[in-house]
Image: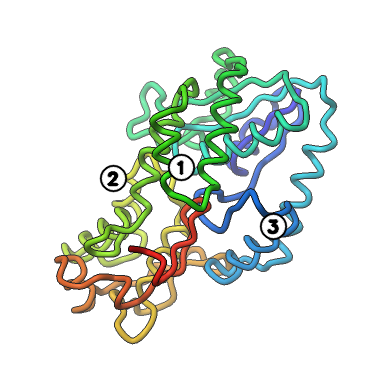
Amino acid sequence: MIHIVNGDVVGNKIQQIDGDIIVWREMYDFGPLSLTWSKEEQINRRAHFFEEKLGIPSKVFIDNCQRQNSLLNDIPKSEEIILWFEHDRFDQTMLMYLLTELSSKGFRNLSMISINQYPGIDPFHGLGQLSSEQLIELLEIKKEITNEQIHEAVTGWKAYNSNDRDDIEKWILTENHFLPFLLQVFKDHRGYFPSHKTGLNEVESLALSFIKEGECLFYNLFNSIAKNRLNDGLSNLHFAAILNELMKGSHPLLFSDIPLPNYLLPASNAKLELTSHGLDVLNGEQNRIHLVGIDWWVGGVHLRHGSIK
């Protein structure tokens, strides 16, 4: 029996469980993606992106991805694989990727533990909030992954990787939905595309609004965003990278007194300040793309200045 989990917190808490544990460490909720690239090219492109945006050394990222892929390749086809992933965008994009990979390799004995709530825990952010005992007890509710669910994950992964955002809408409207949380993730995913009026996505707009209201320290702001975006599973480093994009150029929307958190300095609690340009964008009087530009990925869509109409 093989358990594949998201993150070391859950992996460490279920060490006493029967079977081997693979901790999957990737961030498919952002960064460059395309099914037209080879695996090697995609890993290299993502390594470059995360080194630039998060300060993760390329070698660390590449070594991790290669090690993960080797672990998948070494699993006997007869093994039962249990996937532990909660409801949010971070986890569900990972689940799509893994179901696509495992099904393409011929694995059929697949089960899933996937929840969006737990008695007595409110708000519920994820499996990492549970104790070792609570996690292991979840084995009682594991469910076999059906062929219909695998098909939904595979078609979802294809749409998510598409460079045409219309494929997201087509998937939402035409696919049969059997996985418990994936449809909502795709609906929420649309909020990561920029508004035509302001050039901000929903997270950026919410962040600027909170700063305007006086939420100035990074981790206070991050916690407020996380409470308002429970279905995102947004990490602190992803959020910091989003804000950094708004501080570029000669007309930044934000200032910070010290660098925002990154791979080497994850605890940095910078103080943020909204500029007059940021206020203008928030009020719909200016467009973020005209002031600071854009060079970002939402699934397989590369957002660039001049490519957004």
Q: Which residue is mark 2?
A: 228
Q: Which mark is residue 96?
A: none
Amino acid on which disc 1 is placed: Asp
Say which of 192 and 65 sits in front.
Answer: 192
The nearer-to-camera label among 1 and 3 is: 1
Say above or below: 27 vs 245.
above
Q: Which residue is mark 3?
A: 43
Q: Secondary structure at mark 3?
A: helix
Q: CA distance from mark 1 to mark 3?
A: 23 Å
Give how far across and how far down residue 275 sits, in percent.
23, 78
Q: In this image, 87 relative to 17: left or right? A: left
Q: In this image, 203 relative to 181: left or right? A: left
In primary-sequence order, the first of circles 2 and 1 is 1
In primary-sequence order, the first of circles 2 and 3 is 3
Give how far across and how far down residue 52 sits, in percent.
57, 71
Q: CA distance from mark 2 to mark 3?
A: 32 Å
Give how far across and how far down residue 253 sits, in percent.
28, 75
Residue occupying image coordinates x 75% and y 56% = 40
Q: Which mark is residue 167?
A: 1
Say above or below: 54 vs 94.
below
For the N terminus, the quadrant is top right
Q: In this image, 175 relative to 270: left or right? A: right
Mark 1 residue crowding within 10 angstroms, few (<14) / some (14–19) / many (20+): some
Mark 2 residue crowding within 10 angstroms, few (<14) / some (14–19) / many (20+): few
Give how far across and how far down residue 103 sits, in percent.
70, 28
Residue occupying image coordinates x 77% and y 26% = 106
Amino acid on which disc 3 is placed: Ile
Q: CA distance from mark 2 to mark 1?
A: 27 Å
Residue with the most extreme top position: 140
Residue occupying image coordinates x 56% and y 33% = 155
